[in-house]
Amino acid sequence: NAGVMQNPRHLVRRRGQEARLRCSPMKGHSHVYWYRQLPEEGLKFMVYLQKENIIDESGMPKERFSAEFPKEGPSILRIQQVVRGDSAAYFCASSPSGQGAGEQYFGPGTRLTVT
Amino acid sequence: AQTVTQSQPEMSVQEAETVTLSCTYDTSESNYYLFWYKQPPSRQMILVIRQEAYKQQNATENRFSVNFQKAAKSFSLKISDSQLGDTAMYFCAFGLPGRVGGSQGNLIFGKGTKLSVKP
């Protein structure tokens, strides 16, 4: 059973461009969480999605950031008009059910660098 | 709101010795989970150990064990017989069980402790 997959692993964008980060959950998992890790910091929750629904986006910046988890395909975290402060590692975690924190499996992360 | 505090930014230990990493948290909930994650230079987040708050017995996984003090809201990680491969950032995390239709479930992380195991 493949683990959580994220791609790309490394992404370089110039200021003002768009960044799209993809997360494929483990097989059978329908819940996805996105976290951001700034340099020298712990992970910070951004958004929690189930298939076709955003359940909790309380950690997401109000502008430029959006997330989706369509019925088919991976979850996408989209950052429009990137700025240097968006440089960070972005992790997704998947869960098989709505059991919340009890069972989350992390992907390897995408490191975004904004030049 | 829940918070997680790791008061030791860096620690070092000699190979084969024992080291304890500290973590305290704050919550008004009675049922929750606590975790220790390891993040090596590859940046992969690896679950080391998990504790459910309603269980009084401290969790153990091979060389890793925790000292869970619910009243004191303390959750320390003990690594015995330290190995060079244990060198990594260690993050303490708190989480709530999911609720039907609810939004809980995300993890709250401390800032981490950088552990160096010296030969």
Image: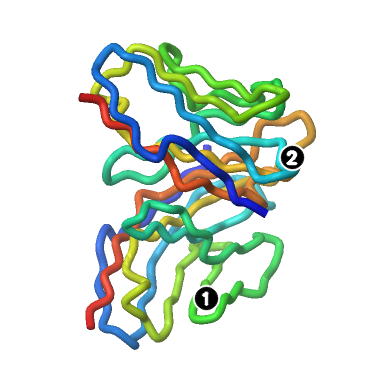
Q: Is residue A29 left or right of residue B90?
A: right
Closer to viewer: mark 2 or mark 1: 2
**Residue occupied by mark 2:** A98
Q: Is residue A28 above or below residue A71?
A: below
Instruction: Assess whether mark 1 and mark 2 are in contact (beta carbons under 8 angstroms).
Output: no
Q: Is residue A16 left or right of residue B48?
A: left
Residue found 72% across the figure and 36% down from its top = A30
Q: Is residue B54 left or right of residue A108?
A: right
- The answer, for residue A73, to whether it is visible in the render is yes
Residue B71 x/y as whole percent? 57, 62
Residue found 56% across the figure and 23% down from its top = A57
Along the line of sight, the residue nearer the viewer: B73 or B103: B103
Residue A27 x/y as whole percent? 70, 44
How many neighbours does mark 2 have within 10 angstroms: few (below 14), some (14-19), or many (20 or more)? many
Q: Is residue A71 above or below residue B70?
A: above
CA distance for labels 2 and 1: 28 Å
Amino acid carrying label 2: it is: Gly
Q: Secondary structure at mark 1?
A: strand
Along the line of sight, the residue nearer the viewer: B94 or A84: A84
Amino acid carrying label 1: it is: Ser
- Indicate the quadrant where residue A20 lies: top left
**Residue occupied by mark 1:** B65
How many neighbours does mark 1 have within 10 angstroms: few (below 14), some (14-19), or many (20 or more)? some
